[in-house]
Every structure is written in C-alpha cells, then in structure tokens.
Image (cartoon, rainbow, N blue to C red):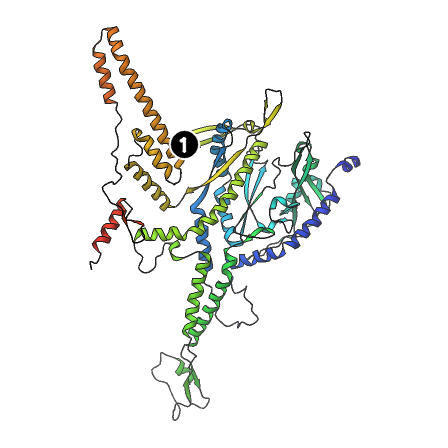
Amino acid sequence: MDEELVKKKIGKKEVDDAYARLQKYKEGKAALETRIVGAEEWWKNNHWQRFNSEFRNANDPQPVSAWLFNSLINKHADFMDNYPCPAILPREQSDEDTAKILSQVVPVILDQNNFEQVYNDCSWDKPKTGTAIYGVFWNKEKENGLGDVDVKCQDIMNIYWEPGIKDIQRSKDVFTTELMDLDELKEAYPELEDKTVGTGELIKSEYIYDENIDTSNKVQVIDWYYKKRILLATGGVKTVLHYCKFIPGIVLYASEDDETCTNGWYEHGKYPFVFDVMFPEKGSPAGFGYLDVMVNPQEYIDKLDSVILKSANLSKPRYFVSSGSNVNAEDFADLSKDLVEVSGTMDETKIKQIQPPQLPEYVINMRTLKVDELKETSGNRDFSQGSTASGVTAASAIAALQEAGSKLSRDMIKTSYTAHAEVVTLIIELIRQFYDLPRCYRITQSNGDAQYVMMDKSELQEQTATMMDGEILTRRPVFDVKISAQKASPYSRIANNELAKELFGMGLFNPQLADQALAVVSMMDFDRREEVIKKISENGTMYQEIQQLQQILAQLAPMVAEMTNRPDLIQAVNGLIGNNQMAMTDVNVNQGNSIKTNSLGQAVNTDTSQAGKAREKAATATEVNQ
C-alpha cells in the first residue's frame, strides 16, 4: 500500500501546493469579485445600499428608478433575438459528409443540454458583470451512464485563474469550487468515511443573499485543471490537460494517476472554459459590462430624484404657530372642520405659513440630462426600443433609425458568436474523444419529416495515407465553425420573406434565366445567399439537362417511327415536348420607372414593395405644393 502511495504523481503535497496557489489567485481576483458583488446589488435595485451613507439624511426619500435595469433587459433581448445557430464546414473535400452530419448533430446536442437556458443565463452575465463563461465538459453520468457532452454557464465567482494573464488558456492552473453536502460527498467517495473532513471553510466570495444560507455542513470541493507538455515519439511536443478533484489535503481523483488518461483528461488540451467578454481589460481574461458604465449616471439620477421628492414633500402647507396664539392646533390641522376655535384676538404674527425654498429649474434639467446620458452611453436610445421622437412617423424612417442604432448590439453579439464558435469546437473535440459507441439522433428536416442519423467518433479519428515513396502521412479531420443568427425577431423574418417575394417577382428563379440570376444574386448580400445561389444553379443545370434530353428524344422519334411503322409517334413526341415546356415567370425589374435622386445624388423611393408604394402614395397626397 505504501509503495502505491509513493508511485502516485498527485498526493497531499501536490494538492497542498495547488491550494496555496488557489489562495493567491483569489487574492488577485479580490477587486473583480468586489465589483461583481456590487453589480449584482445594482441589478437587484439595491441602489441606496451602494451609496455613501456618511453624508446622507436617513429621513430623506430614497427613490429607485429603473433606467439602468431597463437598459440591461434591452441588451438581453438583443441577445435572445439573435440566438446562435452553428454550421460546421470542412477544410477538405473528403470531410464534407462528416461536416454535414456534425451540422445536424451538434444543434441537437445543444438542445439536449437545454442550451437556450445556458445562453440566456450567460446573456444576463455579459452585460451585468462584463464576462459570461461557458463550461464544456464530458459528463459520464448522462445517457444512463453512456456519457455525453455537458454545457453549463460557469459562475465567475467560482472560477480562479493566474493573475495578470489575458488569455485563460495561458494560465498555469484553473480552479473551480463547489459546495457539497458532507453526507453526499462521503457517499460518492467511501474512502472519506474514516477521514476528518473540514466543513464550513469557504475560499470563494459570496453574493449578498436575501435569505440566510447555512454552510456549516458543507464541504468545498475543488476542481483543479492544469497543463503539461510531453514529448512525442516523433520528437514533437504536445500540451495535455490534466484534472484533479480534491478537498483541502485529500485527493479525490487525479487523471495523472489514471491509466486510461495517458493523453490527458481532455485530449484537445484546452481548459474547458470559454470567456465571452463585453468590454475587455488589459491583463485579465474578464472584462467590464454595461452596468459598470451606467452606475454613475444612475446614482445621480436617484440622488436628484431624492432632491426633487424632498422638495415636493416640503411644498406641503405647513405653519409656524406661536405658543401664545390661542389657536386650537387640532382644529387647525383637521381639514374636515370648517370652523377653527380661537381664544381672544388673532393676527398674522401668531401664525405664519412656512415658505419652502423653490426648487431651481436646472435641477429638473440636470436630471433629464443624466437620463439622456445613461441612454446614450448604453446605446439604448428610444428608437432601439420601438419608440419614436417627434416628427418621425414613417415606417421606413423608423426602421432605418432602428437599423442604424443597432450597430452596438451587432458588435456585442458578434463577439458572442466568436465565443459560441469556440464552444462548438470543444463539443466536436469531445465527440472525437468519447463517442466510442454510435449514437442515434432525430433530425427534423425543413419539410417537417424526421431523419435519423448515426454518429460516432470513427470519422473524426486520425487517418493515415501511404505516399508513393512509402512515407506514411497522418491526417486529422479539422472543421471550421460558422455562426449565424437563428432569426427570432419578427421584423427579421418579415424582411426575409419580402426579399424572397421580390426575387421571385423579378423572375430570378426562372431556370431559363439561371446565368443572369446568378450574376444578380452574387452581387447582393443577404443571409443564406449561398443556399439561393446553389438552388438557382441546380435549377439551371436541371433545365439544361431536360433540354438536351428533349433534343435527343426529338432526334430518335423519326427513327423509331420508321422502324416500327408508327408515324403517330412523331406527333406524340412533339406534343409531349411542347406540353413539357417550363412556364416562365414574368420578369419585372421596373425598367419603365426612372430612378429619382436627391440633391446629394442618392437614390430615393427605391422601395417597390406594397408597403413602400403605399408610403410613397401617402407622402405625395400630403405634399404641399409651393
């Protein structure tokens, strides 16, 4: 037994050293954690608890306006309106079939992981704290013990990295922490029954919870990921990822001591975490979010609201009453009484109304300016929420302003797509490593029919080829991941439908005009353009093949009629060819309409849709002739 302990690569000394590094990592992350805890309180509208109370009167009004909250939920809505949809592309022609299967299977794996909820959670973290973290793991307990990919939203408070690094993959170690009930831990690891396990010791920072959370019987379990460089038989160097689960002083599992993990815990050699950052910071894989930018104007909005409300409270009629005024104070304060009893004579010197100071107009203006500042700095103008300013009523103008105002949303969503591409890449690598047995997936086709696809790792393994000189080369299938938006916005769907109808009305789907249609579509830029080009090419090729077959049939008809003494065959073939001529959609490119330009030479009135014509007609009818 002692010899086995000596041979182990990960023992008490190694986990003690790792625990010491974890504590240093936590110290380096202290400022970030303080900011995150504060951001969560701002998100919960606990604004006044974050203000400096030293110079504040406890009796003053403490209003909380939700301008910051409103801006954040609009950012979240932008994320959810552009839910990512992956497409896997091959780098070599021989991998096209595998890439097609992966493009069908990976979205199903994401659905089985309830990825929409994961994406939803990360889409809250990104604008709030500035950093959303995806965790891509292999869960051996899923699928009744068969195991499958597990995608989670990692809480930034429970993960620690080496201070000063920009890329999480450059960190010496990465730690994650989790609280487990002591009884559950001993049930999962029976070897802990005879050992003393410390409880209630927490190394992670805590959020400010509304309820009281008891951690006295909890044990902090630490997942430790680290990398090592190993020499290959070919003389090259490879970086492998190892994993260790431990509690302070006790090793629960170590992949370095597992004979089945000779190539590391995950063979892709990367930490299984993907950081999606809103606004990057130098020297840290984490960033800051919109909330951090909006905190200052939101604070002054609340303080100005407090001043305004206090002034409103002071404007309530109040009076100075002399002690010798002989006025019945109760009757005076009771507005239901028409008569107020007074003893003796009465004059204005004995009772006088309090005149509160008038609130300057610039206070109201400053509050309005602060609200506008918050909207501007967060890119949450009225048009982005569907509201309009005075004088803007045309639907096309509103749509143009919304499109121009959405560039900030497109920018932040694009970085999320980059992170999602990395998530999909890690999923493919886990399929390459762990899909020993084939899995069956149901794929719903565009026409609603179900297709069943089998997937295992055989097509993703390294492939060898022998060259003419006898040299053996090894090739590993590699894929590119392209992310596009799964259209959730009704406006986006309507725009795509209008484009399809416009292309059809122009006759671009006539197979007789395939060459001209390809020239037009190749100059355009819209979503899924490649699919339209492919369909037009296929229709054109099919039309040419039909034309060739008809010519062959017309040439063979006289010969067959002469051989069979059936002259009626020629008439039947001619009728068949004539009846099978493809109908051609009328081409309408508005050649009769001259293009109108404004004083800058820009084309105007280019919208030829039904709605566009209606807008032009209404504008013409209401135009004032001078």
Quadrant where the N terminus lies? top right
Q: Is residue 235 above or below residue 115?
A: above
| Residue 122 horizontal side relative to residue 186, left or right | left
| Residue 417 horizontal side relative to residue 54, left or right | left
Quadrant where the C terminus lies? bottom left
Question: Residue at image x 37%, y 79%?
Answer: 335
Q: Tell me if mark 1 has few (under 14), some (14-19) or many (20+) residues whose alpha carbon lies within 10 angstroms of its own.
A: few
Q: Quadrant of residue 555?
A: top left
Residue 565: where, in percent of width, then height? 22, 6
Which residue is nearer to you in this view: 523 or 417? 523
Question: Residue at image x 56%, y 69%?
Answer: 53
Q: Is residue 538 visible?
A: yes
Q: Please give the residue where the numbered disc 1 appears in the rendered image.
A: 445
Q: Is residue 535 above or below residue 620?
A: above
Which residue is nearer to you in this view: 136 or 515? 515
Residue 75: where, in percent of width, then height? 45, 52
Q: Quadrant of residue 444?
A: top left
Q: Amino acid at mark 1?
A: Gln
| Residue 270 horizontal side relative to residue 363, left or right | right
In the current view of this chain or complex, which residue is farthest to the right? 2
Residue 424: where, in percent of width, then height? 52, 38
Which residue is nearer to you in this view: 146 or 164? 164
